[in-house]
Image (spheres, coloured by chain):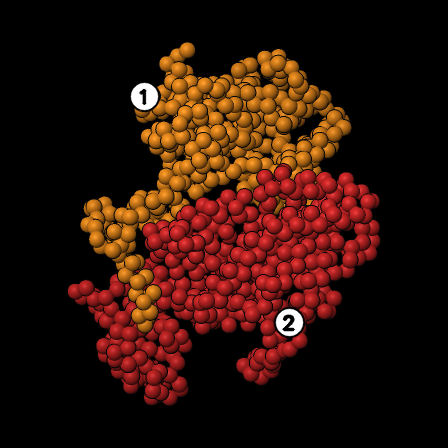
Chain colours: A red, B orange
Amino acid sequence: MRALAKAQALAAGVAQPVATVRHVHLSARPLVLVPLAMAGEAHAPLAALVGATPGEAKLLIVPQPRNRDQRFRFVAELAEVVLPYLDSFRGVSEAVPVDRGRDVRYRYVDAPQLLVPNPAGVTFLRLLGRSTRFRRPDGDYPVHPSVPLLGQWLTFFAERAEQPGSSALLAMTEAVTLHWATGQSAVEDLHLPALLGWLDPPPGLTGAQAAARAEDPTVCPPAGPATDPDFDNRVLAPAMARYADAGDDAGARATAYAELERVLRDQLAPTWELMWRGVGLLAGLPAGARVAGRWDGDKDAFTGYAEHVDAGGGPQPRRDGAVAAARRLHRLERALTSYAVQRAYDDPLVMAEHRLAGEAFVGEVTLADPRRVDDTGKRPVLRPRIQVVTTEPVAVPVGATLWSPARPTQKAKLVFLTPGDGKTEVVLELSGGMGRGLTAPPGSVPEVGERLCWTTLSDAYLPAGAFPEPDQTPWTHGGPEV
Amino acid sequence: MTDTARRLAEIRGDGPPKRHNARTIAALTGNPGCSRRAVLDSAGVDKPKLAERIGFPARFGQSRFAIGRGNAFEAQVKADGGAELLRLVAERLGVPVPAGASWTDLGGADDLPDRQERSRAALTATDDGAALFDHPLLGLAVAGQRVHLEPDLVAARLAGRYHVVEIKSFPVVDGQADAAKVSAAAVQAAVYVLALRELLAAEGHDPESVSHEVVLVCPRDFTNQPVASLVDVRKQLLVLRRQLDRMARVDDLLAEVQAGFTADPSADPATLAAALSQVPARYAPECLAACELAYFCRHEARAQTGAMGRPVREALGGVADVAEVLALAAGERAPEPAQAEAAALLRAAARLRAEALAGTPA
């Protein structure tokens, strides 16, 4: 289905929608961060533009990225922007009922959101977090206390970014391709200028032409973190050399620093504009019904980690132990399943992909017996039956359980399947979502004439698996850590 | 000059054949089904110049920062006659660290035949002691030509076996490195393993004494401390072997190329572009990272589903042409018998897509 949209995009010369609603949360005040890294170095930052509104881009640069002290000074400067931004979400809490309403817990009413241009930007933040969170403000090579703290937070965001459905840290290219298909390959979609070239090409150009133009680094600098080698060789290297040559001459140093700022800002500013254009495009879509619920998960995670930091909690380990790794994998798998189902429930265009795959069908209710009671068991139970007629192929076996996004708490067991001439009659037996009595409340049973989607995808709660405590790690997994 | 050599010279134009190095040989394995690339590479055409001439310049610049850092790290690892390197490699291979090893620098500005002879003599000497050989000059037959490889690498002889040691400046953080960079390094190292094996075999030694496990030396975490890792390159060796064999049968390739075809970069751009389109290419998005001509081929393949990636083409039932896909999806075109299933799926997809976009309640 996405492939067809790509073919249509190529023919139309402009990107085509693959979603009718927005599946990511978009903060009213996201922190946009465009990082650049020094070529050849092990994730040495070179520069960044950062800010929470289009008008207040703060430029941070490292005039000599091979210098360790300057690198950590950059991180401390970045912390001066990021940490107050995070703190600004820690004012107001809301009460959330837990344990079936017997208790409440508190979480912040909103959470911070970081936006970077591409997945490489997420990797850059993860490694920046890795290289700073174990640093210490004392000892042989002391750093500013905000450096390890920022490292912990960046690691927190990078880990959230791995969780399907989380919007705490988004790569703009991924957020955009989740909603639109271009006429170019997935590899080319990683290039933000080319991707947005497809989304709204300048007048007179097709998406392909706009993308090809955006690939030329002299027209449109790359969105980082890797810099254009030609820029490195012809502009950046001489400017850095002038800064190094200035030595202790304060005047020459200031001039050279200003020149470095100018050339780096020129490289970053176009991407900055594109980031906010991307925000605007996403904001143009209405949010999906289940987006807020997933954002609650981000708020919980933010609150939890803020409490961990407040309690003096240490940095995340380099590697998970066996039990922690199994838990993490289980959590990510559950999140992935639930995210896929929720998107389909929220968005008919996503559900259409499942219909094409035979996991869902749309049909019209032709008969309904809302009062049917099954009294073969110990107690009579309400089990209405409905007949649905569909023109779509039904690849679901008799006895399977189906759900409808219109009534997500109701289960429907497929009882009979009668394929006919170009259409199929399906008889479903309903349970759940109709109260406790033997009479269904009005509206809880589909009525004749209703057109509904039925699917094998379930948004029901997935129980968490059971894992041993770390000190009970089985020997097959290396045994307890010593 | 044989017929084949004359034909290749005609394709190449006036200049001397472009020298291959391990990186270009490694890139040959990227898209083995592409005839255009195989012909141009066999002839040693100056592809960067060709691409620029026809208006689709390649973008394979290298930052001087990256080059500088790479050289500095290499010098650091090789310092002290390779004492540190020897320890790292021996420990990684799990053999006792020898008390010392001979260090032979086979590099230098000597003329090629002499260097080649020195490399051959040093590497095939009947001596089993621990030894490190820096800058060995190796050779490999590519498309009937002898290609000289001047690797920046070290061949280590430990416990009677040779190991290719490749020094790279990308970091290994918590035991993990960038997968794309590791796989590129592995293919390059495989080229050297192959060349080293050929050298030993030519002298009647056992080629298997060159290990298929190469040692990759990279900076650890965010420091300059080197760390060694083992990479098994058996799979890369197979792919390489196969592609080199294919290029060796260059006559078969040329049989499919029209007489008079030339890719001489000094020719007229429009003639060049027309001539190139006579030799079939097999463009895939992966080419952008490996082949200088990729932007030209992409432009040419724009209306093809494969240009959006192989998964897209497969999802569209293998139908190659975008216009055909859309015609089948719209039901404006009767599918051929082999396409019937794909066409039905495309029609269903188009109907469902249109319905969802029109907001029909579901």
At numbered mark 2, what does the secondary structure look like: helix, strand or loop? loop
> Is disc 2 on the same chain as disc 1?
no
Q: In this rendered view, identify the residue nearer to me: A254 or B60.
A: A254
Q: Is residue A133 visible?
A: no
Q: Residues within 10 Å of mark 1 (few under 14, many from 20)?
A: few
Residue B259's disc is 1
Q: In this rendered view, identify the residue nearer to me: B205 or B141.
A: B141
> Looking at the picture, which amino acid does disc 2 mark?
Phe
User: Mark 2 falls within which chain?
Assistant: A
* Callouts 1 and 2 close, C-beta under 8 Å: no
Q: Residues within 10 Å of mark 2 (few under 14, many from 20)?
A: some
Residue A89's disc is 2
Question: Would you place residue B103 above or below residue A273 in this image?
Answer: above
The quarter of the displayed image where residue A400 is located: bottom left
At numbered mark 1, what does the secondary structure look like: helix, strand or loop? loop
Residue that appears at 47% across and 46% down: A213
Residue that appears at 66% across and 24% down: B134
The image shows residue A185 at horizontal and vertical percentages of: 42, 48
The image shows residue A118 at horizontal and vertical percentages of: 54, 53
User: Mark 1 falls within which chain?
Assistant: B
Residue that appears at 69% across and 64% down: A83
Q: For the residues carrying marks 1 and 2, which lies nearer the camera in this image? A: 1
Residue that appears at 16% across and 65% down: A421
Left or right, residue A251 beside residue A354: right
The image shows residue B278 at horizontal and vertical percentages of: 33, 30
Q: Residue furthest top?
A: B1
Left or right, residue A365 beside residue B93: left
Question: Would you place residue A277 above or below residue B162 in this image?
Answer: below
> Looking at the picture, which amino acid does disc 1 mark?
Ala
Q: What is the CA distance from the residue labelled 1 to the residue labelled 2?
A: 72 Å
Q: In this rendered view, identify the residue nearer to me: B350 or A442.
A: B350
The image shows residue A326 at horizontal and vertical percentages of: 57, 58
